[in-house]
Amino acid sequence: MKKNFKLLVLFLLVGTSLFAQGDFKMSEQMFSRINQNPSAVGNNEKIQLFTATRLQWVGLGLDQSPTSALLNAHYYLDKINSGFGISFVYDELGLSNQTINAKLVYAYNIDLAENWLLSLGLSAGVINKRFDPNRHVWKDPTDPNRPTEVLATTDFDLDFGFELSYKYLLIGASVTHLPNVAKEVSTTTAPSHINAYVRGNIYLPYKFNLIPAFAYTNIGALNGFKTEVSNEHLLDYSITAMYNNMCWFGLGYRSGVAGTYSSDIMSFMIGYEWHWLRIGYTYDLSVGKLMSLSSSTHEIMLSFIIPTKKPVVW
């Protein structure tokens, strides 16, 4: 009975992703977001190496919980007002779905006026998606209509985005997987994403500053194939307190809706920065209908910062 319940929950949470997998989306998005918006590359004037690993639904008793890994590297060249970087994402959804996305990233910065900065970014690369139905846990394994052929494709990938900043305010938006706009979503076709976000930075006494943020993601709205599982909406709210630009702790809340399915997640974030090293940890907990499940999600972030002449731009 317990096993059947876990399988039911798995279908509720990821059944929509079997044909419309969303991009790897971190709960902690304050420090590196170039895999979702190329305009953020070179957002500080230091060489930065960033890696993160996300382990989902640990303790649920699944054969293999979803696992994601991210690697970013970027740098800003002041002489040509440009940022350059690379982004690599590996995403494994259970035993059957795997995605590898590798991109070169470029952004050009434009000084619009005093304290106003516009960044336009473009990333290009390849995306490989693989689905092995023989390793998937089917609701009815005896169904003669279930697929048996292993599907794998490697396609050209392209993203575009912008960021606009003014003093302590940041606004950004992007569209990912542009070649797939208006295409039918399938097991091996990544749906186009619309990302939009806004973030503030409020300075407080005693070396504290408060960073409120809101992000919206739509998965599948730009694709031609519309079903209740191919048009997903994600809303992210977070508030982070940072002390002396050295350590931080925060809370986040994510609400996801895909057709008639919904899920909510509460995030607890903590991190520390020491000279060239930055490390962070996020614990995600399902709330609402799924709160009774003994499962959790862990996210570990590690960043190496190579100093240059200029200070970090938040």
Image: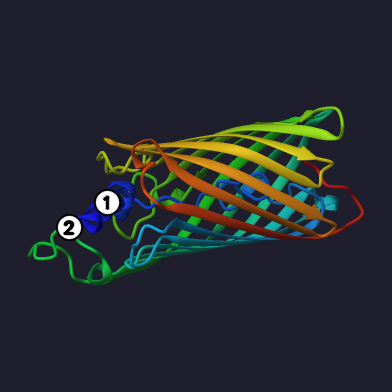
Where is residue 226? Give x, y as percent: 27, 40
In this orientation, which residue lies closer to the viewer: 226 or 294? 294
In this orientation, which residue lies closer to the viewer: 56 or 119? 56
The local crowd at label 2, few if under 14, some if 14 to 19, many if 20 or more residues have their Cα within 10 Å, is few
For the point 84% across and 50% down, which residue is it?
78
Q: Is residue 215 above or below residue 97?
A: above
Cβ–Cβ under 8 Å for marks 2 and 1? yes
Where is residue 94? Give x, y as percent: 36, 63
* Residue 139, numbered circle: 2
In this orientation, which residue lies closer to the viewer: 135 or 74? 135
- Dot 2 or dot 1: first in sequence order is 1
Residue 142, quarter of picture: bottom left
Q: Quadrant of the N terminus?
A: bottom left
Q: Is residue 201 visible?
A: yes
For the point 52% across and 36% down, which residue is it?
253
For the point 78% across and 53% down, which residue is it?
273
Q: Which amino acid type is shown beneath numbered disc 1?
A: Phe
Residue 133, quarter of picture: bottom left
For the point 33% across and 69% down, which residue is it?
152
- Name the side, left or right, on which 182 lies relative to 265: left
Q: CA distance from mark 2 to mark 1?
A: 9 Å
Q: Which amino acid type is shown beneath numbered disc 2?
A: Lys
Q: Quadrant of the C terminus?
A: top right
Residue 148, quarter of picture: bottom left
* Residue located beneath label 1 in the image: 11
* Residue 100, numbered circle: none
Where is residue 71? Give x, y as percent: 61, 63
The local crowd at label 1, few if under 14, some if 14 to 19, many if 20 or more residues have their Cα within 10 Å, is some
